[in-house]
Amino acid sequence: MSWAYPLSWPELTALLAFLFLYVGYAVRTWRLAAPLQQRGWRLGWKLMLRLTYFSLLLVALLGPAYGLTQQPVRTAGKDVWLLLDVSRSMDAPDVSPTRLLKARAELSELINRFQADRIGLMVFAADAFVQCPLTYDQSALQLFVNTIQTNLLPVGTTDLAPALDLVLARLNATPQPVGSPPRATALVLVSDGEDFGENLEPTVRQLTRSSVRLFAVGVGTPEGSRIPRKGGYVRDANGRDAVTRLEPKSLRRLAEQTGGQYFELTDQRNEFPLLVNALNRVEGQAEQVRTVSVADNRYRYPLALALLLLGLDILLTVKIIRP
């Protein structure tokens, strides 16, 4: 036998409260009966009755389960690609503790919200590669997210095109069953928006034709910050400290052209909950029916017996003090 819910402090608190109140009630009744030369022993069988049905109610609440039943589960899943910028500018501390660490924490929370969907992870800077292919394995994906650093790729300026082209290549390489619609696909692009690449329009047109919706998350602040490195800060071509700032324009345009939305993660604003809501509204198009084995919850039996004993307790009265 297994239990659907563990015995936790609310149930223990309710049990202790019942015992405390009932003992107080019994002591009060015996004190009232003593001056009248009477006993309160008739209260004993009521106590046993009430302890029995209260315990049965507690058992029903915990959900006793034994035996396995086969149940079909119908899902309409979607594919979500997480595209994370790992250029040196993501080490900027204008979003505490850094842009990258804050984005990693929020992506971990996002992954936990989509247990029924396949999620993949790509990292990019001047180039891009797949860190984790599409998977239902949440634990493996979390491990990849938590180990991302800005030194995963060679030092270079940020270019959004390689990441988007890699997504398109993955989409084109995925075979689709004959007669079934393609799985809905959403992209979550997390970057500070600094794009030093070439024209993105051809790639965006291909994404639009593929019915892929891109949700962009701008990380950083308009004021910006210097980029730390070992022994100081990154310097520009003139020898001065380079300052990186949030550039939302290109990210917002990408989201609008693909039917997605733009969100921000700054030192004052966290719109990741809005992103989660937007992804929830992307409905999966390929329905799957899987048969899973589930433990049969038998809470009905202790609940029915408890209600029967409760009714008996109400109907039967006991006179403790007689005139």
Image: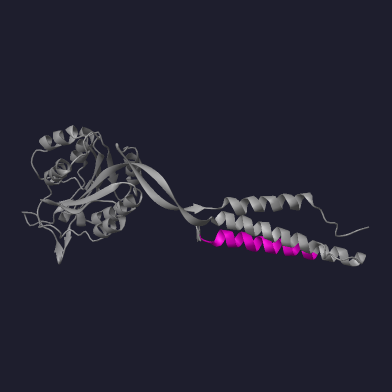
Q: Residue at x 15, y 54 (%)?
A: 87
Q: Is residue 55 left or right of residue 124?
A: right
Count of marks overlaid on the render: 0
Instruction: From the viewer's side, name the closer residue of 34 and 300.
Output: 300
Is 7 inside the magenta-drawn segment? yes
The residue under the point 81% across, 53% down is: 317
- Please tell me whether residue 272 is drawn above or below residue 143 in the rendered image: above
Using the rendered view, name the quadrant where residue 278 is placed: top left
How far from the left and from the top, in percent, is residue 36?
A: 92, 64
Q: Residue shown at 32%/50% (left/top)?
A: 110
In the picture shown, does residue 249 fall above or below 244? Answer: above
Task: Kindly indicate the quadrant of the structure image that contains residue 105.
Answer: bottom left
| Res 64 visible | yes
* Figure colour scheme: one colour
- Depth order, front residue of 117/123: 117
- Direction left: furthest residue: 237
Does the magenta portion include 152? Answer: no
Residue furthest to the right in view is 323
What is the quadrant of residue 38 in the picture? Answer: bottom right
Secondary structure mainly formed by the magenta segment: helix
Quarter of the image with the C terminus is bottom right
In the picture, measured across the screen, residue 140 lies left or right of residue 232, that is right
Pick the residue in front: 41 or 248. Answer: 41
The answer to whether residue 220 is seen in the rendering is no
Q: Which residues are magenta?
A: 6-27
Q: Residue 81: give x, y in percent of width and height.
A: 23, 46
Residue 32 vertical placement versus 244 (above, below): below
Q: Percent from the top left, x then y, of residue 222? A: 23, 46
Residue 191, horizontal then vertical, whole percent: 21, 48
